[in-house]
Amino acid sequence: MFEKILIFVLFLGPLVFFHELGHFLFARLFGVRVEVFSIGFGPKLLKWKWGETEYALSLIPLGGYVKMFGDDPLNKDEIEASERKFSFTHKGKWARFWIVMGGPLANFILAFVIFFFLLAGGEKVPEIKMGRLETTSQLYEKGLRSGDVVTKVNGHTVSSPSDIALESSDGIKSLTVTRGGTDFDLNVGMGAEEFFEEFSKFPPYFRKPILVNAKGEIKGVMLSDGQADLALSLDDLVNRLPTNLALFNVALIDDQHEVAEELGKQDIGQIENLEQLFAMGYRSLDLMVEKTADGSAASKAKIEAKDIIISLNGQSVFAFEDLRRSLQESEEKSARIQLWRNGETVEVELVPEVKEIEGKLTKLIGVYSAGEYVAPTYVTSQPKGIVESTTGAIARTWSSIVKTIEGFGMLLTGKVSLKTIGGPLAIGKVAHDSFHTSTTYFFQLMALISVNLGVINLFPIPVLDGGHIMFILIELFNRGPLSRRKMEVAQQLGLSILLMLMVGAIFNDFSRFF
């Protein structure tokens, strides 16, 4: 828990600091006195005075603030004439605009700087690998296969999904992929959004080449002329079919299967496809039940740990994802599941629980897979020069701004559920996960959240930076500030909207994690 809190502070702290620094620097540039510069809200844990400003670290690390002299427009007339030159509200519209805009602008600049140094230093990221493709998918029809590693888009080298986005402004015309050590050039001819929508359907979770039979016996599968290797995924083997395969023994070490010292190699001849292998009396390990959730449909139907699921509603399944997808696509209210248990075939019937998850009705049976997966392979991109890093960082920052705005647009139009909004717990989780994935992912995420923070603060909601800019524009066209009463109503309305959004985000967090 301490580690998670520390990572969260390391992640969010720079975003808050640079946002408030933007306000601070523009305030000082235009001669406004800054009374307090605080990172965090609430009680001050540490504070010191330097010049006219008190600097502080406060208890709640979910934001910060810069308190400027004379920043309350409702009391501007009470400021003495001799002090008004240091007052925010007595500055001209142009000065006030840039002081307010300084925060979001600093967030965009921070994102640019992060992207620049990532590009200039080289990025360590997982390979862009295709997940387990269905034969009916568009990508399969275009010639892509499970486990393909994408190396070029439209003839240009790519090392991360964001690179694909930058290279696909005119669509995905061609791809170069590496398959089994050989490069293949494929004509794709898809729009960028169409490609990413299809690509996201097949996440790169690759099963270890471990099989289990009806008796619960565990075997590894390998190339007959190769070495036993549990880092070569089952899906990588699929790309090499038809070929000669062999089975070998595996040992359970620290809750994970590893190659046994005595391989017990058993040649099984040429295999044309996975279905042929499974027809020999095997299923992949991910179809073995690790456990069932208490009170779930699977628990009530007496499904047990170490049962192996082989079919759903009479249709054979060969991967846990097949089971998940077939369950969602089924129009039947109940589900008939066939299992292997202690060498026998058993059939159970259950009624899946239906819950709304992220705005979609989802069927749940409460089964946890015992599958084991191959760790992703990381690659480090070649460092880019100053010019290329600068143009790439500008493009990534601008693309992040546009996509963030589009995302909020879909929220407002109802195309995306409000339940997808995450709060501090969601941010903390993705920060922790990205930190343990790679430093590159951690900083990429930091840049993206920095852009999000900048965009959110530009919303025309009173109490946010965008609300202050809105008042300045109204003042410009109104030839004077709003009345005291209108200002009070607007601020109360803005605060209410902000509180509702915060409560909604925190509620979503607790719904997801508890």
Image (cartoon, grey):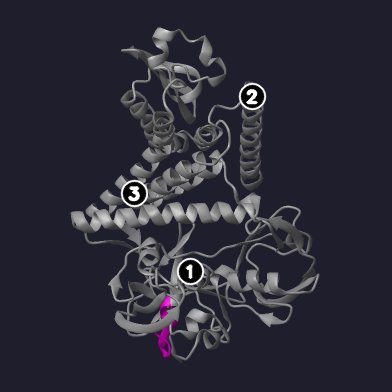
Give x and y (percent) for residue 135.
54, 84
Which of 223/195 is in front?
A: 195
Furthest residue in direction left, as rendered? 385
Q: To which residue does mark 3 refer?
A: 439
Give x and y (percent) for residue 173.
39, 79
Label 1 to label 3, Cα distance in Å?
Answer: 24 Å
Give x and y (percent) for residue 407.
54, 55
Relative to 421, is 306 above or below? below
Q: Which mark is residue 488?
A: 2
Number of residues whose C-alpha sits closer than 10 Å to that of mark 3, classed few (under 14), some (14–19) or many (20 or more): some
Number of residues whose C-alpha sits closer than 10 Å to that of mark 2, classed few (under 14), some (14–19) or many (20 or more): some
Q: Quadrant of the C terminus?
A: top right
Q: Which mark is residue 188?
A: none
Secondary-structure class at tag 3: helix
Residue name at image x 77 percent, y 74 percent: 331
Residue name at image x 47 percent, y 60 percent: 256
